[in-house]
Image (tube, grey):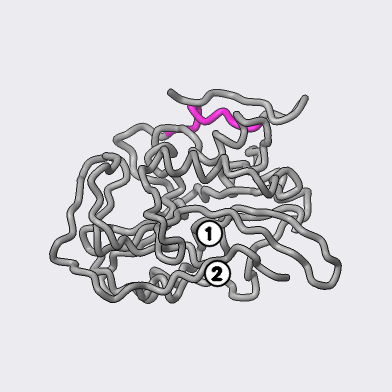
Amino acid sequence: MTDTLDRAKEPEMDFDVARRRFLSGGAALGTLALAPGVTLFAFPAEAKPAHEATSGSVRWGLLVDITKCEPECNTCVKACKAENGWHGFDRPKTDVQWIRKVNVRDPKSGRKFSLPIMCQHCTAPTCVDVCPTGASFKRVDGVVLVDKHLCIGCRYCMMACPYKARSFVHEAIDDQKPHAPRGKGTVDACTLCVHRIDQGRIPACAEACLKDGHGAILFGDLNDPTSEIHKRVATIATTQIRADLGLDPGVRYHGI
């Protein structure tokens, strides 16, 4: 298959890590219906108390139904930008992208489809393996993150990620969100909206897609047999992109 929108993200070399600037810091959605008889989320009841540590019994993940993902729709991308405060600088090859839409065409059948690509939050993340400072790490609930205070901007993680899901911040960032600290000279990637998850909410991309009437992105606990995402993955055909690499992504796709 041919990725028609995949972008080259060759990193620029003229960065100055000494000038990085950081910010530090850190309405529940309720139950929503995707279709008659199908209830997706009841996360307020699943939120852990703030004083409790993250549980390893949970494996947060996404199920993307590409049969509901329209090629011209960028609702998930817009929601991610608004929630986490990132944007481009009219430099498509190097601009930060936490999530991007990719249009694919199968050269054999001519079939076309569109899907969002973000950090796949792998069980065995290569980005973590190659990080020399420990800045890239995985929480016990499967969320893969970057500690911006430890990131030295070497970009090994970007080269190791087979999904091109990480970006390098080339510009000084002035309008950061308190829950998503970013800095020039560091690496950015989807956090699965971990700040919302820890409050019992769902990621902004999934929420926006649902509110827009598409319902193409389902978030939940892959380990919980009572969760909608677990039931869906157990009963319908799903695909892990580059499953041959054995990374066990937490993002599954239906309809590929």
* Picture coordinates of residue 25, whole percent (x, y): 22, 41
Image: magenta residue range: 40-47
Q: Give the amino acid at mark 2.
A: Leu
Q: Give the amino acid at mark 1.
A: Gln
Using a 10 Å C-alpha cutoff, classify the residue at mark 1 as few (fewer than 14 neighbours), some (14 to 19) or many (20 or more).
many
* Picture coordinates of residue 86, whole percent (x, y): 37, 48
Classify residue 1 as left or right of residue 25. Answer: right
Q: Tell me where residue 18 sits by quadrant.
A: bottom left
Label 2 sits on residue: 247
Q: CA distance from mark 1 to mark 2?
A: 9 Å
* Picture coordinates of residue 104, whole percent (x, y): 70, 62
Membership of 45 in magenta stretch: yes
Q: Secondary structure at mark 2?
A: loop
Q: Residue at x 58, y 48 (%)?
A: 62
The answer to whether residue 11 is above or below residue 72 is below
Front residue of 40/20: it is 20
Front residue of 183/223: it is 183
Which label sits on residue 120? 1
Q: Tell me where residue 11 sits by quadrant.
A: bottom left
